[in-house]
Amino acid sequence: MNRQDQLLDGFYRRDTYSPRVQDMYPRDQPSAFAGVDPVAHTQSPIVTGTSVIALKFQGGVMMAADTLASYGSLARFRDVERLHKLTDTAVLGSTGDVSDYQHVQHMMERLMIREDYHNDGHKLAPPHLFEYLRNVMYHRRSKNDPLWNRFVLAGHHNNTSFLGYVDLQGTTYQSDTIATGFGAHLAQPLLRKAVESRGGPQNVTEEDAIKIIEDCMRVLFYRDARSLNKFQRATIATDRLEITEPYSVDTEWAFAESIRGYGV
């Protein structure tokens, strides 16, 4: 026994210290080493946000999303802002996993910083940001490790409004009205009807857009169990970009007194 083994045997005395690893597990046994689990990817989101709705109007784009992040079906986090200002001309809204949304936020912020390094006066326009986000989502989907989100990107640049959608598979489209989550079933018909009845977004005033958005958010609060009557509204216009503080709309529940059902 060499000097080093003598010292180790003296240190690992069985009557005072835990036995040496090789006394319990011979080196030729796999149990002597920590097991390595296969790489696992998220199969379903845990903390999620629900609908994002948006429409073009005369001279800009308007978007809204509530501030609830649900832990499964529990209304756990009530102050999560799901509208994020990317640049002075673009806003990003997210439905789906909140942690993946935060990851994308940081990714887009790093993109903005790298772009500013050039100091050449060039700014990324909303279509550029949209294409970058599409590539990110498609890349992650191709790795079988998707970001569990559906994004709405709205912007206004060079007197042109932009409104686009991208999902976890990298599928994209652009439209005058967009709604994600449960809003795709409940709010999208209302948005389309309101815009088409006025002859297109060029005839929708900002006041009209606010009323349409608030009516849709009210319906979602009534009908979507994962929604909250506390939301933000973003306005992207030629001369400004603003995101309101969270606020609520008036609701009416008196009609529920006359409803009977479920064995009552």
Image: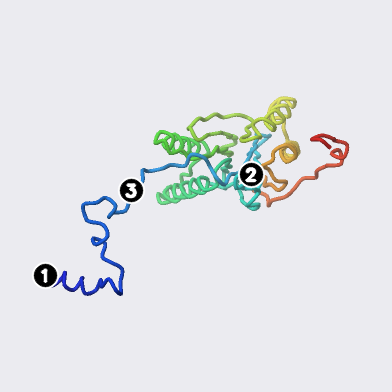
Q: Residue at the location (50% across, 35% down)?
A: 168
**Residue 89 pos. (x, y %):** 57, 43
Mark 1, residue position: 2
- Contact, CB < 8 Å: mark 1 with mark 2? no
| Extreme residue in the left direction | 2
Mark 3, residue position: 36
Q: CA distance from mark 3 to mark 2?
A: 33 Å
What is the crowding at mark 3: few (fewer than 14 residues within 10 Å), some, or many (at least 20)?
few
- Say which element carries label 3: loop
- Contact, CB < 8 Å: mark 3 with mark 1? no
Q: Amino acid at mark 3?
A: Val
- Contact, CB < 8 Å: mark 3 with mark 2? no
Quadrant housing the N terminus = bottom left
**Residue 39 pos. (x, y %):** 37, 43
Q: Amino acid at mark 1?
A: Asn
The answer to whether residue 133 is above or below residue 29 is above
Q: CA distance from mark 3 to mark 1?
A: 34 Å
Mark 2, residue position: 73
Q: Residue at the location (73% across, 41% down)?
A: 221
Disc ID at residue 195: none
Mark sitting earlier along the chain (1/2): 1
Mark sitting earlier along the chain (3/1): 1
Q: Residue at the location (53% across, 34% down)?
A: 166
**Which mark lies nearer to you, 3 or 1?**
1
| Extreme residue in the right direction | 258
Mark sitting earlier along the chain (3/2): 3
What is the crowding at mark 1: few (fewer than 14 residues within 10 Å), some, or many (at least 20)?
few
Q: Nearer the viewer, residue 183 or 71?
A: 71
- Say which element carries label 2: loop
